[in-house]
Image (cartoon, rainbow, N blue to C red):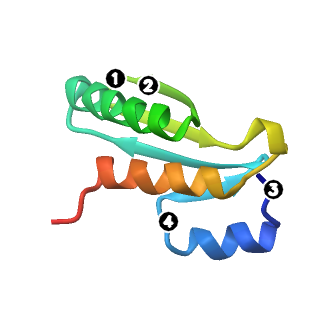
């Protein structure tokens, strides 16, 4: 998988307003009602990660989930990162 240019990343991020690009990765932070809801979302995200065979750098403190995505083998952001970001968005902010 090829590393995306900074211009391509910034263009794609227009569709992901909760995400930012810095330190050679895309990053987002999501706040939930409580720890249980946060952990539940993390569990659902974990299944998507396994399905895509792509895993985030993430951390959780109480009701806040912080996620960083990059493709280590490409040394930067790839299409795989945006596919996972899209799956994450559908889990944490489902359309009504």
Mark 4 element type = loop
* Quadrant of the snapshot with the C terminus: bottom left
* Foreground label between 4 and 2: 4
Dot 3 or dot 2: first in sequence order is: 3
Q: Residue at x 42, y 34 (%)?
A: 65
* Foreground label between 3 and 2: 3
Q: CA distance from mark 1 to mark 3?
A: 33 Å
* Foreground label between 1 and 4: 4
Apparent side of residue 17 relative to residue 78 in the rendered image (left or right): left
Mark number, residue 43: none
12 over 40 or under it: above or below: below
10 Å neighbourhood of mark 2: few (<14), some, or many (≥20)?
Answer: some
Q: Residue at x 47, y 59 (%)?
A: 18
* Foreground label between 4 and 3: 3
Q: Nearer the viewer, residue 41 or 59?
A: 41
Q: What residue does disc 4 label?
A: 16
Q: Position of residue 53 (x, y in %)?
A: 56, 35
Q: What residue does disc 3 label?
A: 3
Q: Quadrant of residue 94?
A: bottom left
Label total for image:
4
16 over 72 or under it: above or below: below
Q: What residue does disc 1 label?
A: 62
Q: CA distance from mark 4 to mark 2?
A: 21 Å
């Amino acid at each position: 998988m090829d590393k995306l240019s900074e211009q391509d990343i910034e263009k794609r991020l227009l569709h992901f307003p909760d995400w930012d690009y810095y330190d050679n990765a895309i990053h987002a932070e999501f706040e939930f009602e409580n720890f249980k809801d946060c952990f539940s979302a993390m569990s659902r995200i974990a299944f998507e990660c396994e399905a895509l065979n792509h895993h985030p750098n993430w951390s959780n403190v109480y009701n806040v989930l912080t996620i960083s995505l990059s493709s280590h083998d490409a040394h930067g952001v790839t299409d795989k990162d945006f596919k996972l970001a899209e799956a994450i968005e559908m889990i944490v902010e489902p359309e009504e």
